[in-house]
Amino acid sequence: MNRDEWITLSIPYEVKVTEKKSIFIAYAAPIHSQEEAEGIYLRIKKKYPDARHHVYAWRIGKDTILERHSDAGEPAGTAGLPVLEVLRKSQIDDAIIVVTRYFGGILLGTGGLLRAYTKSASLAVSGAIPVACKCCNVYNINVSYSNLERIRYILKKNNFQMEEPHFGTDPILPVFCERQREEELFRISQEYTSGEAHIVNCGKHVVETRISEAEK
């Protein structure tokens, strides 16, 4: 997946899971840099200073994917890597998960730890609302009032996302368009307004669409 299209989290979210008296507090959030990830990790450690383990994993994607994870004192491969795999399997970039564990006095074993960290991280990610992001150009389409509803109907039918029109001497309709659909947008705009539409590129915008459970 290139950086015209990616998946991330929309909001921070924290959840608590109890497994055999051990308490796992999982926090997931969107991030934009390694420095932001490190800041979140330190903030969680400060929030729960008496916890035995603060496991983390994060991924940041641009031209390439940068990722880090830590078992934070848990047996190797039972904590940080399973948390990272939750992000990998969902193809989530620009996100961090921190799972804080309070030991409850009962050993979970390597399999139990792996399942508990995976479950906690998965619940945190679900609560943080994964979203599919598309980097689009914003085009303002200037048309007459007589053609406005017609062009809105056709663009909606062809699955173009729009904002509400701006009303003035003539209405202006902002439309979000992926790079590969620009020719289609220009063609529709001219064809269904008898060539009167005036189209202006107004820069880029990231469009987010919530990912349903069925799509994961």
Image (spheres, helix red, strand yellow):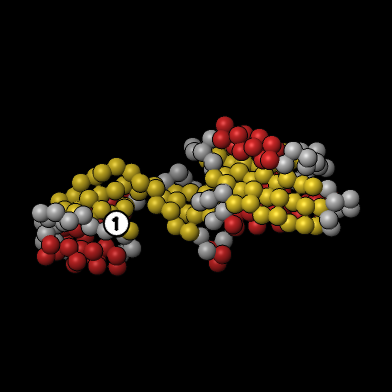
Q: Quadrant of residue 68?
A: top right
State the residue at coordinates (70%, 55%).
16
- Asked if residue 199 lies left or right of residue 182, the reply is left
**In this rendering, is residue 132 above or below 76?**
below
State the residue at coordinates (33%, 58%).
161
Q: Quadrant of residue 193?
A: bottom left
Q: Position of residue 78 (x, y in %)?
A: 78, 47
**In this rendering, is residue 115 above or below 154?**
above
Helix, strand or loop at label 1? It is loop
Q: Position of residue 192 (x, y in %)?
A: 16, 63
Decide if residue 180 is in sight here. no
- Asked if residue 93 lies left or right of residue 204, the reply is right
Q: Quadrant of residue 125?
A: bottom right
**In this rendering, is residue 6 above or below 38?**
below
| Residue, far right | 106
Q: Position of residue 65 (x, y in %)?
A: 56, 39
User: Three-letter amino acid code at disc 1?
Assistant: Glu
| Residue, far top | 35
Q: Name the residue beneath numbered marker 1.
A: 163
Using the image as rendered, state which of residue 207 and residue 27 is in the foreground.
27
Using the image as rendered, state which of residue 59 and residue 103 is in the foreground.
103
